Amino acid sequence: MQVYVIESGDTLYQIANTYGTTTDALIEANELEAPNNLVVGQALVIPIIGQFYFVQSGDSLASIAQKFSISVQQLAQINNFPIGNELPVGLRLYIPPQPKREITANAYIEPYGETVSQPLINAATNNTPFLTYLAPFSYTINNDGTLNPPPLDNFKQIAANNNTALMLVVSNLQGGQFSTELGRRILTNQTVQDKLLDTIVTTANAGGYHDVHFDLEFLPPENREDYNSFLRKARDRLHANGLLLSTALAPKTSATQQGTLYEAHDYAAHGEIDDMVVLMTYEWGYSYGPPLAVSPINEVRKVVNFAVSVMPADKILLGQNLYGYDWTLPYEQGGEPAKAVSPQQAITTASEQNVAIEYDQQAQAPFYHYTEAQGNRHEVWFEDARSIQAKFDLIKELNLRGISYWKLGLSFPQNWLLLRDNFTIRKNIGSS
């Protein structure tokens, strides 16, 4: 699989010819709505086995082989090029695909209202082949420890059709907001805890769930040890019933990080107690904040580096957004929120506004500016093939368990192509 970034004057025919594929294959892989209107700076996935590398000044067979983690002998043999010869600049070399590691892939899906919309059903159907877990968001906790289920439609059957397990997500949401007081009640009231765990086990068994996932946020900092104790109690109860335990963790970079979002989340304890954790490594750029990359790789790396220093890497799922944001400028704190956009929508807008897409090398994220017809200036940050590949490379580098997406429903076809190209997705749902 190859990633190519559009330059001025490029055409699909030219790109397809260069990489030994067809224009139809490029259109299908990238779901191009306007294939004749490519955007400068737009990243395309080239659907080929392996990839090509074009020799640059200063390259040698040894440096190229090292770059792609293959031997000089293999590189020379595959390309029928003598090892002792000088490489001409511009020579196209074929790089074979590398062995793939098996990972766990989870995706949350968040239905609204009384029933599940057809687009969400389609998203679940189309993407569960690439998932270990599908996680309907969420069962919300009542004050007495009972649960309110989300609309589920036929998620159970969709998951079963693709040998995908279900993750039962439990949250302290009340009225659409995470409730600190409800969190305190759950962590300090033994009667509520017992009722909650009874309800969870019954619900999980009836619904065919494999993992119980606590997303308890904005917990009182003073209840940090109470949360740890509750998780130990939950783990013992869940394991006794053949269920796994996982939690969602705020993106911390140290054990002493302050703030209600962070303090009650004890990375070291969760790493010891849980079967796996999800790091919520997104929302640096968020709807009510200033324009920023949603999951800048430099900030994501800081969180992951801390996490692997206090917990096993093979328990960590890297959180990843499947969306971006479109901000109206100038940004004003407390003003109108940014609009969530899919990567496909972001590219369409750039095409319609006739603006080039730029790329922030530090954040490893694409962005652009445009001015709408009414004169309002906008800034858009989103994800593309390059930014998602940077996250996949981090997973490989640090040997993480896998990835967890927030959330299904916004189109990002390149992600799923690259996920499958980089990894084998764990489907043995009977294993921990």
Image (cartoon, rainbow, N blue to C red):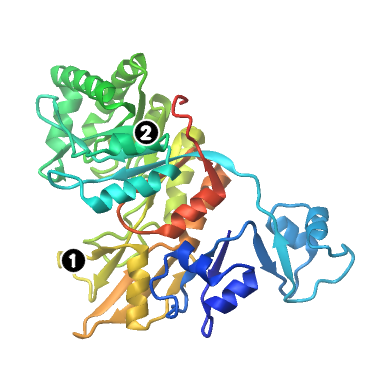
Image side of residue 29 versus residue 283, left or right: right
Q: In which quadrant of the rendered view does residue 91 lie?
A: bottom right
Could you say where residue 402 lies in the image, as x and y percent from the top left?
A: 47, 41
Identify the secondary structure beneath mark 1: loop
Mark 1 crowd level (few <14, some 14–19, many ≥20, 10 Å Cα): few
> Would you say residue 222 is visible in this rendering?
yes
Q: In which quadrant of the rendered view does residue 141 lie?
A: top left
| In the depicted structure, whether residue 328 falls above or below residue 303 | below
Could you say where residue 202 lies in the image, as x and y percent from the top left?
A: 22, 20
Q: Nearer the viewer, mark 1 or mark 2?
A: 2
Mark 2 crowd level (few <14, some 14–19, many ≥20, 10 Å Cα): some
Q: Which mark is residue 160?
A: 2
| In the depicted structure, whether residue 79 falls above or below residue 269 | below
Q: Which residue is mark 1?
A: 333
Could you say where residue 164 lies in the image, as x and y percent from the top left?
A: 40, 35
Identify the secondary structure beneath mark 2: helix
Q: In which quadrant of the rendered view does residue 266 lie?
A: top left
Query: Number of labelled discs?
Result: 2
Residue flagged by tag 2: what amino acid is it? Ala
- The disc, 1 or 2, on the residue closer to the chain's N-terminal end is 2
Residue at 47% across, 75% down:
41
| In the depicted structure, whether residue 84 falls above or below residue 216 | below
Residue at 50% across, 62% down:
386
Image side of residue 112 versus residue 261, left or right: left
Nearest to the observer: residue 391 or residue 49: 49
Residue flagged by tag 1: what amino acid is it? Gln
- Looking at the rendered image, the quarter that the N terminus falls into is bottom right
Q: CA distance from mark 1 to mark 2?
A: 45 Å
Residue at 79% across, 75% down:
88
